[in-house]
Amino acid sequence: FAARDPMNLLPDDWREYARQRFELGRKPATVHTELARLSNCLKWAAESHMIERRPKHWLPSRGKPRDRVLSPEEAGRLIAGAREGDPHIEVFVVLLFGSGGRHTAVLDLEWSRVDFAAGTYDLEVDLPPDPMNKSWRKGRANLVMSKMVRAVLERIHPGRTCDHVIEHGGTRLVTCADGFRNAC
């Protein structure tokens, strides 16, 4: 829609966009998100008086929610698959299972927040408050190590080469997407 005046967009234009994206193999949730973001941009533009009003539009269904839970056997196979790859991927997967935390929280974990004596690890990052950011107050968990988490952390602790638990080549990893995909 880049070359189009927003006021000239019709609901059928939104449907045609969705149809083209579905033909490319995009999932309903992806197409819904793309068009919902456009809708929000147009709403903001109307509220900011950049356009007269938000045009009528259409959004596809979000599709089925992703609420699939791994069975214990599948979880075991994922950990085994991670173990076959780079060592940091196994640590990443075990910490995800052990904490239930978001992948970014696990990647942010530093050795200074791992307490072997108490058997805990703290996913909370001590950042200065930022009142301009709505999410700065969101807390992360201080967790008790499971046997599996303790075993993997004790195994890699002697070989650490930086402050972060999930690291490779002496530097903190920002993503484990490729290694996780390979483990899957």
Image: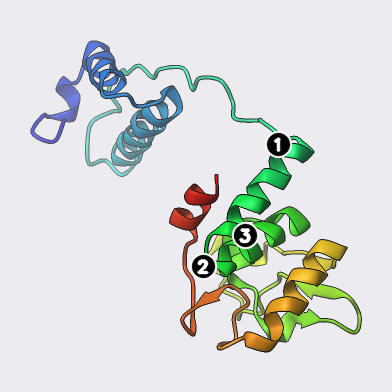
- Element at label 2: loop
Q: Which corner quadrant of the image does residue 167 belong to?
A: bottom right
Residue at mark 3: 83
Residue at which label 1 appears: 70
Residue 146 visible to the viewer: no
* Above or below, 170 relative to 61: below
Which mark lies nearer to you, 2 or 3? 3
Cα–Cα span, label 1 and label 2: 38 Å
Residue drawn at (30%, 27%) of the image: 54
**Residue 175: % across, % down:** 47, 62
- Amino acid type, label 1: Leu
Q: Kindly report which numbered mark, 1 or 2, lies closer to the viewer in this rendering.
A: 1
Q: Residue furthest top?
A: 12
Q: Is residue 160 left or right of residue 168?
A: right
- The mark nearer the N terminus, 2 or 3, is 3
View extreme (left): residue: 3
Q: Which quadrant would residue 57 be assigned to in this image?
A: top left
The crowding category of the residue bearing disc 2, from other C-alpha atoms within 10 Å (few below 14, some 14 to 19, many at least 20), is few
Q: Which residue matches tag 2?
A: 132
Inter-mark Cα distance, 3 to 1: 18 Å
